[in-house]
């Protein structure tokens, strides 16, 4: 249903009195997510649902959370809204549990850089700055630790892979 078209129809009704139009408009119930869906052509949807519908239901599903991140970025591009940080934090948390530090770093940096760019382009003082919020701060705090863990992981993997390469070379020469 195109909400805007329906509202225009109500206003165009010449025979309707203002009170009748007001009653009809009051029957239209729309939440902000539906409005954003309408404005962005569904950019904020993941598999036909609003991203917030997955926040609890699929919070342990890293692929779903990554889709939510993508939807938040598309919504930002189309509607100029700040992407919700919760999905980026969930991907970071789940990535660390999987010891996928590169992915954790990628999503933390993606969010931080996106937000920095967002506020650099919009210097309006009347916009709430998510950088002051706890979830943004949690993402920023994770980044150095994730880089440290990746360095530690790489330093452990390289000596082991060097040893296995050395063994395979010595077998070839025997």
Image (tube, rainbow, N blue to C red):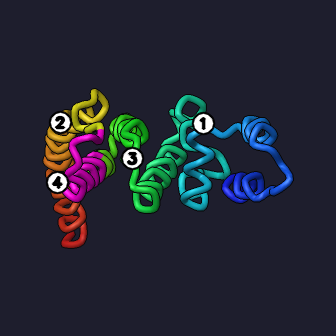
Between tags 2 and 4, which lies in front?
2
Answer with mark 4 or mark 3, whichever residue precedes in sequence: 3
Answer with mark 1 or mark 3, whichever residue precedes in sequence: 1
Q: Residue furthest right?
A: 15
One can see residue 76 in this view: yes
- What's the magenta bit mostly, secondary-structure-wise? helix
Q: Position of residue 109 (x, y in %)?
A: 24, 50
- Against 10, residue 126 (above or below) is above
Disc 3 is placed on an element classified as: loop
Q: Are marks 1 and 2 in contact (CB under 8 Å)?
A: no
Instruction: Tell me the residue that label 2 is attached to.
Output: 145
One can see residue 156 in this view: no
Q: Position of residue 76 (x, y in %)?
A: 41, 55
Instruction: Tell me the residue that label 1 is attached to.
Output: 53
Structural crowding at the residue carrying mark 1, measured as other residues with C-alpha within 10 Å and reported as few (<14), some (14–19) or many (≥20): few
Q: Which residues are magenta?
A: 108-127
Instruction: Tell me the residue that label 4 is attached to.
Output: 158
| CA gap, disc 1 and disc 2 | 30 Å
Q: Quadrant of the C terminus?
A: bottom left
| CA gap, disc 1 and disc 4 | 42 Å
Q: Which mark is residue 83?
A: 3
Structural crowding at the residue carrying mark 2, measured as other residues with C-alpha within 10 Å and reported as few (<14), some (14–19) or many (≥20): few
User: Is residue 108 toward the left or the right of residue 90 in the image?
Assistant: left
- Against 38, residue 57 (above or below) is above
Disc 4 is placed on an element classified as: helix
| CA gap, disc 2 and disc 3 | 23 Å
Q: Are marks 2 and 3 in contact (CB under 8 Å)?
A: no
């Amino acid at each position: 249903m195109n909400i805007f078209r329906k509202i225009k129809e109500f206003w165009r009704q010449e025979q309707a009195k203002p009170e009748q139009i007001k009653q009809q408009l009051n029957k239209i119930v729309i939440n902000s997510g539906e409005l954003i869906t309408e404005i962005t052509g569904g950019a904020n949807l993941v598999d036909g649902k609003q991203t917030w519908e997955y926040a609890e239901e699929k919070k342990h599903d890293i692929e779903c959370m990554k889709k939510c991140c993508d939807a938040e970025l598309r919504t930002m591009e189309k509607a100029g809204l700040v992407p919700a940080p919760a999905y980026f934090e969930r991907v970071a948390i789940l990535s660390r549990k999987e010891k996928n530090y590169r992915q954790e770093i990628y999503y933390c940096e993606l969010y931080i850089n996106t937000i920095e760019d967002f506020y650099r382009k919009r210097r309006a003082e009347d916009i709430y700055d998510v950088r002051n919020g706890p979830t943004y701060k949690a993402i920023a705090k994770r980044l150095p630790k994730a880089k440290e863990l990746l360095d530690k992981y790489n330093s452990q993997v390289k000596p082991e892979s060097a040893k296995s390469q050395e063994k395979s070379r010595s077998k070839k020469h025997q």
